[in-house]
Image (cartoon, rainbow, N blue to C red):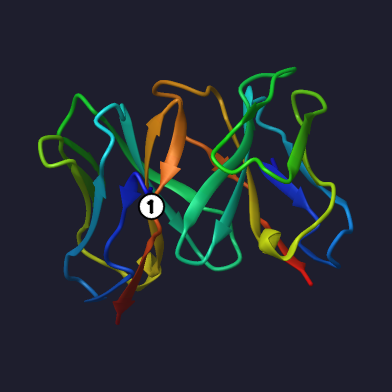
Amino acid sequence: DQQVKQNSPSLSVQEGRISILNCDYTNSMFDYFLWYKKYPAEGPTFLISISSIKDKNEDGRFTVFLNKSAKHLSLHIVPSQPGDSAVYFCAASEDNLFFGTGTRLTVIP
Amino acid sequence: NAGVTQTPKFQVLKTGQSMTLQCAQDMNHNSMYWYRQDPGMGLRLIYYSASEGTTDKGEVPNGYNVSRLNKREFSLRLESAAPSQTSVYFCASSEASTGAAYEQYFGPGTRLTVT
């Protein structure tokens, strides 16, 4: 059974607006959460992470929020740019990484 | 600095054929991983090597073998390819397998088709 779920396969956002990508997980033992970004024909690249002891981590335009009680993770991108168009994977670690199925973000100029 | 490199980029096999996917990293990382990505499934871990000389099964190891040849290289072998192994294969490396240094660096992938 999928331990990390991204229920929205795709998301379209206007340039300059906020993009919110969501992720849910079932395993309360996960100790670290990460977001990866993937362009076509390339491998995933690390974007941002958060420890399970924190509820927010910010890096420039990217902020990750963690709600442990709801077992929910979200990535906010503000402002969104056309170059952000990619597939975003959330991942969670317990010894190894477990990946969600990905959300394709399209930022419309 | 090439990061993680994978060969080949594309491969077509007939059912029953064997092949080895090669992976090398130049970041002096201790841990290396093999994943497969299938539509609607995300990335799933096949095998990993936490350090040179060790290998362990991941989530979907059946039909595969691995070799950690040295600290730089980690190969994935399909002994008798099956159509269910049609997928995109990614190799990754990281400084450590647990804790804060968990960021994994991925190669560009190998697209394998088994007919």
Residue A95 seen anywhere in this rendered image of the structure: yes
Instruction: From this view, report whether residue B34 is shown above or below residue A7.
Output: above
Residue A21 location (% of width, % of height): 24, 59
**Label 1 element class:** loop
Q: Give the left or right position of residue B23, taking residue A92 as reference.
A: right
Number of numbered tags placed on the structure image: 1
Locate residue B13: give its quadrant.
Answer: bottom right
Residue B22 location (% of width, % of height): 80, 45
Locate residue A76: give its quadrant.
Answer: bottom left
Instruction: From this view, report whether residue A30 is shown above or below residue A18.
Output: above
Residue B74 seen anywhere in this rendered image of the structure: no
Locate residue B11: give its quadrant.
Answer: bottom right
As drawn, the residue found furthest toward the left would be A69
Q: Give the left or right position of residue B23, taking residue B51 as reference.
A: right
Q: Quadrant of the C terminus of chain B?
A: bottom right
Mark 1: which amino acid? Gly
* Chain of the residue displaying label 1: A
Q: Nearer the viewer, residue B99 or A60?
A: B99
Q: Residues within 10 Å of mark 1 (few under 14, many from 20)?
A: many
Q: Which residue does the image show at 67% across and 25% down from the upper left?
A: B28
Q: Which residue does the image show at 60% across and 52% down from the upper left?
A: B36
Instruction: From this view, report whether residue A26 is shown above or below residue B13.
Output: above
Residue B81 location (% of width, % of height): 80, 57
Residue hosting label 1: A100
Q: Nearer the viewer, residue B107 or B76?
A: B76
Q: Nearer the viewer, residue B109 or A6?
A: A6
Residue B50 location (% of width, % of height): 61, 22
Q: Quadrant of the N terminus of chain B?
A: top right
Q: Give the left or right position of residue B48, taking residue B71 as reference.
A: left
Q: Give the left or right position of residue A65, taking residue B77 as reference.
A: left
Q: Which residue does the image show at 74% across and 43% down from the upper left?
A: B64
Q: Which residue does the image show at 70% across and 19% down from the upper left?
A: B54
